[in-house]
């Protein structure tokens, strides 16, 4: 086309201007050529821009034609104020990259807009060596091929066409941005209505991000760009992971609202039946959700999602029970019977990788699993059983305020309940201060007086000595200046034989050689009676009440 226009200009110069350069030729160039060059640019030069790197060499012919056109205009005297054709041809790298980017984005958009949700199994190896198995669609695989081809092309263009290489690298980032923008918007109805499709899209994002990690290692020049793109892809996948899980939680929470805080179930059998039906529906929702997502996600993602869903369910039940301020005996029994159905949720975690789930396995995945069953048991425990469990440390997952509230709701306000609440608050049993005070004020234990079977006289002395001492205390006469004594005088000595210290106890042969003291004792007793005045019965009782017990010293000390 450009060659034909050159021939046309030469014809005009020859037949219109007679091969003469003058004002008319310059005026012709200023008026006619600008529109002509714009038409040539849009109809001839722009379409000639190659769409692949293999066609870049063919554009050299177009460049030669543009230079020839410029020379023809100068030869004919057609002044060119500017030459957009030459400017465009000199920036062919930029125009090629722009055209190539548009082609790549169009191809990527076609892949993104396909409503194909069939998934196929695949696996990826993480940086820590773990292998994840899940299902993905064909869309991320086609995009990955398109990205790899584009980046391979940038390497070939980097030496001769650096501008094109840079522009194509930015085109890869545009393609990933297009994927993140269109997929969740265009396919949103499908993702929201089908949890499996939402989680497959989550898998697509993580699979594509993993492919970009390996691609970044092969292309260090664009490593930072690809790392930023893969982080955004992972964030998008996590967002749909959370959204899918929250949808299931929301459905379960709406069902749990029918319990109405476990109020009124003890008196009304219809309410109890409604509770059982609601619990069955909740369990069915959990099993249905698990069956839907089990084949499409990795086992780690599967257990994480279900663990958090079941934990939110149990947390809601625990909160509703702990919010009750008064739980009767019959009501606690009905609630506990309703909660027994939760045991069926163990089967939700069954998976072909590890087989049937067990209670211990579920307790590792669901933080509130053990706490829930302890709370269910507390509803039917006595206060003593609850406190025994608390002292053994079995209720460590309950806060002190929770245990205090449960005791107040389950049991009447008694001294025992208040004592147990104080023990829970302090963390140790209360101290019985009255018992300690009794021990501190108790009288010391009196030492027993040894007796022998060989002497009746010693027994007589021990039996009569306290009475004689008491009589002496009461028989006081102010007119009597003579010293009154009780007990033994210096002359009243008892000869006690030496005893072997190494010998323990008394034998039949161990006899005390005690003199006959009966006569002396009777004499002293008569003297005391003569000196003492009559004793009132009231005084005797008072004195006896002041004296508690007898010490050994009361037998052998002198009193005035």
Image (cartoon, grey):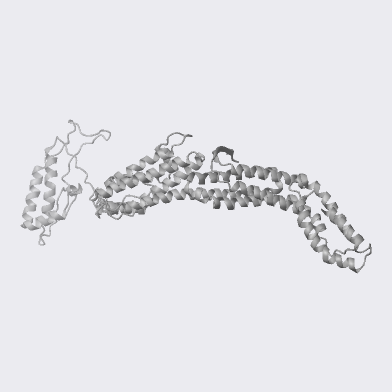
The answer to which image quadrant residue 38 occupies is bottom right
Q: Position of residue 214 (x, y in %)?
A: 65, 42
- In this rendered view, identify the residue nearer to me: 228 or 294: 294
On the rendered image, what quadrant is the C terminus found in? bottom left
- In this rendered view, identify the residue nearer to me: 477 or 31: 31
107 left or right, relative to 313: right
122 left or right, relative to 289: right
Q: Position of residue 159 (x, y in %)?
A: 79, 47
Q: Position of residue 120 (x, y in %)?
A: 55, 38
- The residue at 88%/66% (across/down) is 26
Q: Residue furthest bottom?
A: 23
Q: Is residue 79 visible?
A: yes
- The residue at 14%/54% (across/down) is 545
Q: How many marks?
A: 0
- In this rendered view, identify the residue nearer to me: 247 or 529: 247
Q: Position of residue 278 (x, y in %)?
A: 34, 47
Q: Is residue 159 visible?
A: no
- In this rendered view, identify the residue nearer to me: 125 or 521: 125
């Amino acid at each position: 086309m450009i060659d034909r226009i050159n021939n046309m200009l030469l014809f005009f110069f020859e037949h219109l201007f007679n091969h003469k350069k003058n004002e008319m030729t310059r005026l012709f160039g200023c008026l006619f050529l600008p529109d002509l060059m714009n038409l040539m640019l849009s109809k001839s030069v722009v379409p000639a821009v190659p769409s692949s790197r293999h066609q870049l060499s063919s554009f050299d012919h177009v460049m030669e034609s543009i230079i020839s056109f410029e020379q023809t205009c100068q030869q004919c005297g057609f002044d060119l104020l500017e030459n957009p054709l030459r400017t465009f041809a000199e920036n062919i790298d930029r125009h090629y990259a722009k055209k190539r980017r548009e082609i790549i984005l169009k191809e990527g958009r076609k892949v993104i807009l396909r409503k194909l949700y069939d998934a196929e199994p695949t696996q990826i190896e993480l940086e820590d060596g773990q292998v994840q198995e899940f299902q993905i669609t064909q869309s991320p695989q086609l995009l990955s091929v398109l990205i790899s081809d584009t980046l391979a092309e940038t390497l070939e263009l980097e030496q001769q066409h650096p501008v094109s290489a840079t522009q194509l690298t930015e085109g890869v980032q545009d393609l990933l941005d297009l994927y993140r923008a269109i997929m969740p918007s265009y396919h949103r109805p499908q993702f929201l209505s089908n949890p499996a499709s939402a989680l497959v899209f989550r898998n697509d994002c993580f699979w594509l991000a993993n492919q970009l990690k390996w691609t970044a290692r092969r292309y260090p020049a664009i490593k930072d760009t690809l790392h930023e793109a893969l982080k955004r892809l992972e964030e998008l996948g996590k967002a749909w992971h959370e959204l899918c899980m929250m949808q299931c939680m929301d459905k379960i929470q709406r069902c749990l609202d029918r319990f109405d805080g476990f109020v009124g179930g003890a008196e009304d059998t219809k309410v109890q039946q409604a509770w059982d039906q609601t619990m069955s529906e909740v369990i069915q929702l959990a099993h249905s959700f698990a069956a839907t997502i089990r084949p499409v996600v990795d086992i780690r993602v599967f257990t994480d999602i279900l663990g958090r869903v079941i934990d939110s369910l149990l947390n809601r039940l625990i909160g509703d029970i702990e919010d009750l301020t008064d739980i009767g005996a019959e009501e606690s029994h009905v609630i506990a019977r309703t909660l027994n159905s939760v045991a069926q949720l163990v089967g939700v975690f069954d998976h072909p990788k590890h087989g049937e789930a067990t209670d211990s396995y579920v307790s590792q995945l669901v933080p509130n699993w053990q706490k829930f069953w302890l709370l269910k048991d507390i509803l039917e425990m006595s206060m003593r059983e609850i406190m025994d469990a608390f002292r053994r440390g079995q209720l460590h997952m309950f806060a002190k305020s929770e245990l205090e509230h449960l005791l107040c709701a389950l049991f009447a306000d008694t001294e025992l309940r208040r004592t147990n609440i104080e023990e829970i608050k302090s963390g140790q049993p209360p101290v019985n201060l009255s018992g300690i005070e009794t021990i501190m004020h108790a009288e010391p234990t009196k030492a027993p007086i040894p007796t022998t079977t060989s002497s009746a006289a010693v027994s007589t002395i021990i039996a009569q000595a306290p009475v004689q001492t008491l009589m002496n205390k009461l028989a006081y006469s102010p007119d009597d200046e003579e010293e009154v004594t009780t007990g033994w005088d210096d002359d009243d000595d008892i000869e006690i034989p030496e005893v072997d210290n190494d010998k323990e106890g008394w034998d039949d042969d161990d006899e005390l050689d005690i003199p006959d003291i009966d006569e002396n004792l009777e004499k002293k007793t008569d003297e005391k009676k003569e000196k003492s005045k009559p004793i009132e019965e009231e005084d005797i009782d008072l004195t006896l009440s002041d004296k508690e017990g007898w010490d050994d010293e009361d037998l052998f000390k002198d009193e005035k």
